[in-house]
Image (tube, rainbow, N blue to C red):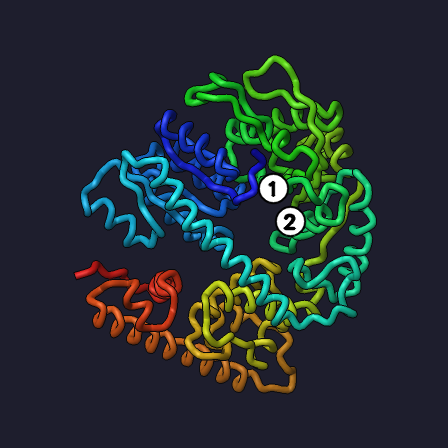
Amino acid sequence: MTPTNGRVLVVEDDPVIRANVLELLTEEGFEVISARDGADGIALAKARIPDLVVCDIALPKLDGYAVFRAIRADPEIAPTPFIFLTAKAERTDIRAGMNLGADDYLTKPYTASDLLGAVRVRMRRVSELAARGRAALEKENQVAPSMRSPAFAASDGVVVLDSNMQALYDQAARAAASSINVLVLGETGVGKELLARALHNLSARQSGPFIALNCAALTETLLESELFGHEKGAFTGALQARAGLLESAAGGTVFLDEIADLPPSIQTKLLRVLEDKRVLRVGARAERAVDVRFVAATNRDIEAEAEAGTFREDLYHRLNGISFTIPPLRQRPAEIAALSRMFLARCNAELGRQTSLSLSTEVLEVLESYAWPGNVRELRNVIERGAVLCSGEVLLPEHLPARVLSRAQGRSSSTPPALENSRADVILRARGELQAIERQRIADALEQSAGNQTRAAEILGISRRTLVYRLSELGVTRPRKR
């Protein structure tokens, strides 16, 4: 069965349980990725961005609690629903996981219907949020179609207003029609994967899978297994044969992010795949034919590394059929306002706000004058953070991080420095006052609910997850229910 229902990461050290869960969820149409310990679980989550995590609490290297904290600390994967598995029925063990903010838990031994029920409930919620996000974008995105690259629509989540970006995306649309391999260059956070997805969606392979992998996130052994797959018995815990990403992406596109971090041994194997269109699973003797298109990306000077011999030159030339360099956000300020509105529309949908947030003129001025060293990813994180902190209907400067306020560039040269400092002080002081108000409102709600966070969230008119984020942002210790 071709996976269609979403990607589930299973972190379980018991090989039998892991194999059974993998088989069960795969038969139900989910794409399943799995790890044997907490460290590999975190690495896979960062490399593959799952839609749901099912994680045992007792794990080698790092326990399930550590996996949960690492995922919640990473803005890329923080909203991912999380289900704990535990062999202990004691309330203290269960309570510890739920108090961290997990969405659900299952106590071993659980039945297949128990597991499927929990997974389906959480994945249904993911689908609902995705649909609401798309609807919000279509309703609230304010980018005029005439100002877009003609190949892309607002629903793609692509903002193309800068003239250089329009030219780049027009070239990408032409390249998409061919099967040529593509190398995408640019600083961290500029939107390299977004361009890769656009190439896939405009190609003849659009009906096939698009599979992304962060090469820098995995150990060499795990990376080899993920890319090339393995045979039964290839290593401890390999209880059944498993196709790798290159086989799973048949008829589609493989996006290899941070390609410059690929270990030398994997570079050699990948080169053979590119040349022969065949893949050899770990532990296998016979090769298998693969039909995929490669899009690779890096934020490093990979050409210089190839010339220096730190990256295989022949592999570099194979990957670099055509290259696109995405300019940093600071070089395309015309897109900041549109991107900010798009991210805010998504936040409105995901947070389930009854009244949608809007951006104040002051906030837009700050955003457009900031240098954005983290590029589009940093802008998205700033907007998401502001949306969580804002209890009103308009996002104000005090909802922005101090670094953005203090480092914003482009202030009027006619404004006296003392006045500028005074304004900054006012903004920072207002932000502190807002946080104090937030803390008090949350404390009052928790007091009314006797520490029940779900009930407290209802009193505040927000989701439980939003409450958890606010507690974390404000440095408030999460209470125990009384």
Residue 129 drawn above or below residue 396: above
Residue closest to the eye, 170 or 265: 170
Q: Residues within 10 Å of mark 2 (few under 14, many from 20)?
A: some
- At 46% across and 19% down in the image, what residue appears? 235
Asked if the residue under mark 2 is in contact with the one under mark 1, i.e. CB atoms within 8 Å, the reply is: yes
Residue 193: numbered disc: 2
Q: Residues within 10 Å of mark 1 (few under 14, many from 20)?
A: many
CA distance for labels 1 and 2: 8 Å
- At 40% across and 36% down in the image, what residue appears? 11
The spot of residue 40 in percent (x, y) is 44, 35
Residue 212: numbered disc: 1
The spot of residue 68 in percent (x, y) is 37, 47
Judged from this view, the residue extending furthest toward the left is 482
- At 30% across and 63% down in the image, what residue appears? 454
* Three-letter amino acid code of the residue under disc 2: Glu
Q: Which quadrant does the N terminus fall into?
A: top right
* Three-letter amino acid code of the residue under disc 1: Ala
Residue 52: numbered disc: none
Report the label total: 2
Residue 204 drawn above or below residue 463: above
In the picture, measured across the screen, residue 72 lies left or right of residue 58, that is: right
The spot of residue 32 in percent (x, y) is 49, 36
Can residue 98 be seen by looking at this rendering?
A: yes
Q: Which quadrant does the C terminus fall into?
A: bottom left
Can residue 185 be seen by looking at this rendering?
A: no
The numbered mark, 1 or 2, whose residue comes first in the sequence reads 2
Where residue 431 sits, quadrant-wise, is bottom left
Helix, strand, or loop for circle 2?
helix
Helix, strand, or loop for circle 1?
strand
- At 51% across and 66% down in the image, what residue appears? 349
In the picture, measured across the screen, residue 176 lies left or right of residue 68, that is: right
